[in-house]
Structures are given as structure tokens and as C-alpha cells.
Amino acid sequence: MQYLTFFCSLSLLLFFSNSLVLCYDGPLYDSSAYTQCKQHPEEPLYNGGILKDHVPNFLRSILGNGGQVSHPTFLLQNLTEGNRYCFSVWIKIKNADSSLVRASLVMEETNLSCIGTVIAKQGCWSFLKGGFVLTSSSKFSKLNLQDSAGRDIEMEIASASLQPFTKEQWGLNQQTKIYKERKRAVIIHVSDRHGAKLQEAEITVEQVSKDFPFGSAIAKTIIGNSRFQKWFTERFNAAVFENELKWDATEPKPGQVNYTIPDQMLEFVRANQIITRGHNIFWENPESSPQWILNLTSPDLQSAVTSRIESLMSRYKEEFIHWDVSNEMLHFDFYEKRLGPNATLQFFEKAHQIDPLATLFMNEYNVVETCDDVNSTVDTYISRMIELKRGGVTMDGIGLQGHFDVPNPPLMRAILDKLATLGLPIWLTEVDISKQFSKESQAIYLEEVLREGFSHPAVNGIILWTALRQNSCYQMCLTDNDLNNLPAGDTVDKLLKEWQTGILEGKTDEYGSYSFSGFLGEYKITAKYGNKIVKSTLSVRELEKGGVSMDGIGHEGYFTVPNPPLIRAVLDKLATLGLPIWLTEVDISKRLDQETQAKYLEAVLREGVANWGGGRTVIGTWNCCSVMRLLLHC
Ligand SMILES: *[C@@H]1O[C@H](CO)[C@@H](O)[C@H](O)[C@H]1NC(C)=O
Ligand SMILES: *[C@@H]1O[C@H](CO)[C@@H](O)[C@H](O)[C@H]1NC(C)=O
Ligand SMILES: *[C@@H]1O[C@H](CO)[C@@H](O)[C@H](O)[C@H]1NC(C)=O
Ligand SMILES: *[C@@H]1O[C@H](CO)[C@@H](O)[C@H](O)[C@H]1NC(C)=O
Ligand SMILES: *[C@@H]1O[C@H](CO)[C@@H](O)[C@H](O)[C@H]1NC(C)=O
Ligand SMILES: *[C@@H]1O[C@H](CO)[C@@H](O)[C@H](O)[C@H]1NC(C)=O
């Protein structure tokens, strides 16, 4: 640590705070979720909440066609406007192999047609988790569990639970999660060169970058528009191209491949260290595909598909942090229809083959937004991903578009809980609020969605679908054409400010220490004592979480699957501090076989060397016996 050879030395100690001391005695949100069909149901969440000791009724309902179905119902009294209600129940069915069971709520004035779903199976117990918020209180309501197709399915239920949270309690639960997941407590000790603690040293802490990727879609309108570029880079560290990488944009006519526009956009994001999602390789919706592919014969389509993926992925190898491989496959199946049921499987295989380091994503709508869409329930999404994995696909992340109407926060959180059981990073990839609402309502709903996303531990990034085009956006703009904030823009600016540490100033205490709680990211630290100043940098990082961890100065680089564009972006950011960067303990997880370790190691080292520029990066490997023996002397 050659920067600390001053009069006073400064050492940093990170500790992990496990508990937030809050004067809160309300209910704590229970994030338990199960996707396996079990022999026995688990205990009810919240000990049943207001459904404790509540026996369900079985109602017979008359269907439109005159038939009758019998289904379980809970009769509920005095549901309160504004409360967030979390509902969960275990279900076993008898007279069918499987049933998409939907929970709904019938009240005096309105009905909520879906507050949760589960794909229940015969002979074992499945877990339904959902929730709702009421816009007006209800004295009497019925919570129904029914087969979504209206079939007469015999259902057994167990461990039902309904737990209300007031709006304030919900908000405090979010704050607790944010504190634990997105921040770390840091203590700075200042001492003189003999190790004596220095009291009253002036400390300045400045967060210079944020780890959490938060961004927006951009359109080609950003090219050459320096004012807009400045506006963007002041706010966001992540992006996606709205349309410019899509097949119909890069190859409008057969064989006329043109990457001029995405290349220019890439130049902008690279120059500003903005990590960017690759969207998308294929889109299962024929209407959103190049029209010239629609009438191709299957062999011609196969060869068009092969050239598309080869051209795109080799050109942009290691440029995008994710690739959406087969967009919206739960709603459309153009390629499956034309190329066979394994088309998506082949897309993933091919993508992985061309760029083994590419992070491959699914990207889908109406999964987290609502449970009304039978094509894209959370269980449908999960089972499709499991099926692809079984087929040999390397799936690296779950994309949830997030095109919302009125958000339902407890349902959204319940769905995220279920998806989180897969252990993959979850990104909200295209967040916006429908333009059917006023700009003010859009802003209010957007805030609910963003708070829910940011406070969920499994969410690793959020991208807004707010590309500013000539005079419009898809559903929701953040600003007008002159970059004046609209209400949604105010919301985003408010949250950006709330979710950063900014600049902190203080003095060391009698123990020579100063502590703060900082959002994950890079920091500049200055300590001043008398006329002596010492400066350092600090990475406040989450450790041992997710597939990629890339730590800078004085920290380690334990990789599982390295993500070169992310590494480069982090190194570029760190380089702005003008200090040498050491990758001090590079290795690849021993969970991987030796061949894969070697390949991934090479990728990391190449990235490190490529970023050497003037001795900027120095690499040392962590050659532990169980991993591999390789040491670089730089
Ligand atoms: C619901 O509210 C009514 C009127 O305030 C009250 O009489 C009744 O006991 C309440 N029911 C329950 C189950 O709390
Ligand atoms: C609510 O649902 C019930 C039962 O399906 C139906 O009879 C009633 O008309 C619905 N009410 C409204 C306001 O939609
Ligand atoms: C490629 O696209 C750019 C931008 O739209 C355009 O200026 C250029 O003429 C195109 N090139 C060809 C060969 O069509
Ligand atoms: C594809 O074929 C259909 C019917 O044969 C025709 O109506 C349609 O115009 C064709 N589409 C294109 C893009 O050629
Ligand atoms: C569900 O998917 C099927 C076929 O993929 C399609 O016909 C149907 O319109 C879709 N439904 C919705 C609600 O998107
Ligand atoms: C699809 O892939 C699965 C798993 O690899 C394989 O068992 C099956 O035979 C394939 N089906 C077709 C039609 O190729």
C-alpha cells in the first residue's frame, strides 16, 4: 500500500452488518418459496396470519355453460384499503395430472381476477404464493381457488396464510432489505505511523461509482447528441439498445447486414463505461421479426438463422453483458413451429459455442407484472427454464421485462421469491408503466415497481424501457424532448439520489475510527489530520454472491464464470481514480473442470493484460493447490 507511506496511515476494515437496529415490531416479510411439488406441505407462513384457524368453505359455482365446479373459498372480513396482503397456500389436486390454479378475490365493488397462481400436480403438494392491494376497503370478500380453465378439479388445500402489512410496514421491510443487500457498514481507522489512534481526523468519503446496474434503453437518437449523452451518463451505468440490434434492424433485407447504428451506439456506451445488455438475438414473435424470413422454407430459414447468430455474436463477442437469446418464448413460438421443438435449445447452444463467456438470458413479459396471463405464469417460466437446462442449455439469468399497468407489489415480490429459488441473477429488463395512465400515475406506479425491484435480493439490475426517440417513448418517457423531467423522471432522480452514498464528512472518534454505511461501489476516502492528508480508495463490495465478483484495488478476483465486458467496465471505472490496479488473487472456481478453469482463466488474464495500459493492471494468481498453479510476474 504505497499510498499510505505518509505521516498517518489509514486502514480500512469492512464488516458485515447482519441486523439493522430499527424500532420496528411489525411483521417481517417471509421470503420462503418452493417450486418443488412435495410429499408434505410446509407450515403456513406467518403462522397463518389472519387465516389462522380459518377453515375454507367449498363452494359450488355455476359456469357459463351450465356446468358446475366445486372449489375452495375463504370468506374474509374487513380487508383494508392500502394494506399489502401476502397470500400463500399449499394445494394438491386429485382428478387431473396438473392444473393451473388461480387465486382470485371477489368483493362488493370490484374483483381481482388473479392474486396468485400455481401449477398444481396430482398426488403432491404445490406452493402458491401471491398477494394483493385494495383500492377500497371491503367488508366481505371471497378468496377463491379455481382451475384457471374452469375445469372441475378436486383440490385439497393446507397451510393457508394471509398476512397484512400496512404501507409503512411494507416500506420498512424494503428499507431493511436495502440496508442489508445493497449497503455495507464500513469502519475507517486512522492512526499515526506508530499505530496510535488519531481522534478528530477529518474524513471525507465519496462514492465515485455504483455497483448496482440501473439504466435505461437508448435509441439511435443518442448518437451525436452530446447533451442527451451527458444527461444519460450523469444518471445511468447500464443500458440496452431499444431496437437497433434486433434482426429486422440489422438485416432489413436478406443478406444486407448493416451494423453501423449499433456500432455507433456501442461506441457511446463503451466510452462511458456503461454496461449494456444485448437485445435480442431472436424474437419468437413473427410480427417483430424481419418480414422476409416469414415465408422462407425451413432449410432456408435454418441457414438464415445460423448466419444471423454467427454474424451478430462474433461481431459483438464480449461486448454485451447479457444476450437475450429467444425473446418472449412463452408467448410466441415462430421458430419452434418452423424449425422444430428444440429451436430455442439450439439457439442457446449455438450462442454458447460462439461466445462461451456470453451471459445468456431469457426475457419475458407478464411474469412479474401480473398473474393473469396463462402463458407466462411464474411456474410456466420456471418449468421452461428447467426443461432447457435439462436439454443442456447454459442459462445464466432470468430477464423480466416489467411492462406494468397498476403494479401489485406483494404479488411482484412473491413471484421474485419463487424465481429466486433457481439461484440465477434476475434482471428487470424493460421497466415502464402503461401509457393508459396519466404521467403522475405513471410516476407513482414506477416508484412502487423500482422500490420492489431494488429491495429484492435476487434482483441484480434494473433497466427502464424509456428510450427517448424523436418525440416519444414506447410507453413512458422520463423527460420531454428538451430533457426537462416528466414526473417519472423526477421519481428516477429521487431514487438515484436515495440509493447512493454521495459525499460524507465526519471526524474520527476517541478510538480513531469513523464509520458509515455505504451503498456498494467504489469510494474515494480522504483523511486529514493537522496538515497531513492521506488518500485511498475503497471497494465496498458484496462478497461471495452471484456468478461474477470483480474487485479492485486491494481486493480479490474469485471468478466462477467471468464476464469480460463487466470486468472491463469495472477496470475502466477504477482506472478513473488514476491508481494502479492489482488483480491480486485471480483464480477460477474449483466447481468447474480444469479445462473450463483454464479457458476462463485465460479470459480473465487477457482482460487484465488488455487493460494494462501503462502498468495500470498488475495480475497475480491465487495458485492454491486445489485450483491450478500459475504465477505471472509482471
Ligand atoms: C369487521 O368490522 C365490523 C365493523 O367494524 C365489526 O363489527 C366486525 O367484528 C369486524 N369483523 C372482524 C372479523 O374483525
Ligand atoms: C365479480 O365476480 C363475480 C363472480 O365471478 C361476478 O358475479 C360479479 O359480477 C363480478 N363483479 C364485478 C364488479 O366485476
Ligand atoms: C448502413 O446504415 C447506415 C446508417 O443507417 C447507412 O448510412 C449506410 O448507407 C448503410 N450501408 C449500406 C451499405 O447500406
Ligand atoms: C407470405 O406468404 C403469404 C401467403 O402465401 C402472403 O400472403 C404474404 O404476403 C407473404 N409474406 C411475405 C413477407 O412475403
Ligand atoms: C398464448 O400462447 C398461445 C400460443 O403460443 C397463443 O396462441 C395465445 O394467443 C397466447 N395467449 C396470450 C394471452 O398471449
Ligand atoms: C430435443 O432435445 C431433447 C433433449 O436434448 C431430445 O431428447 C429430443 O430428441 C430433441 N427433439 C427433437 C425433435 O430433436
Image (cartoon, grey):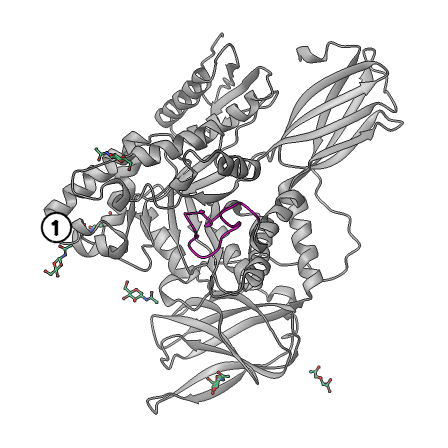
Q: Position of residue 48 (x, y in %)?
A: 63, 70
Q: Nearer the viewer, residue 392 or 210?
A: 210
Callout 1 amino acid:
Leu
| Residue 574 showing in the rendered view | yes
320 left or right, relative to 413? left
Q: Residue at x 61, y 52 (%)?
A: 491
| Residue 562 showing in the rendered view | no
Identify the element where label 1 is drawn.
Answer: loop
* 395 in the magenta segment: no
Majority SS type along the magenta span = loop
Q: Nearer the viewer, residue 2 or 253?
A: 253
312 left or right, relative to 10? left
Q: Residue at x 69, y 50 (%)?
A: 176
Q: Which residue is mark 1?
A: 296
Quadrant housing residue 54: bottom right
Q: Residue at x 78, y 26 (%)?
A: 203
Quadrant housing residue 306: top left
| Picture quadrant of ligand 5 | bottom left
Q: Which span is picked out in magenta?
A: 463-484
Q: Nearer the viewer, residue 105 or 281?
A: 281
Q: Position of residue 285 (x, y in %)?
A: 28, 56
Badge 1 density bin: few <14, some 14–19, many ≥20, Cα 10 Å? few
Q: Residue furthest front?
A: 482
Q: Which quadrant, please, contains the N terminus? A: top right
Q: Relative to 583, is 113 above or below?
A: below
527 left or right, relative to 95? right
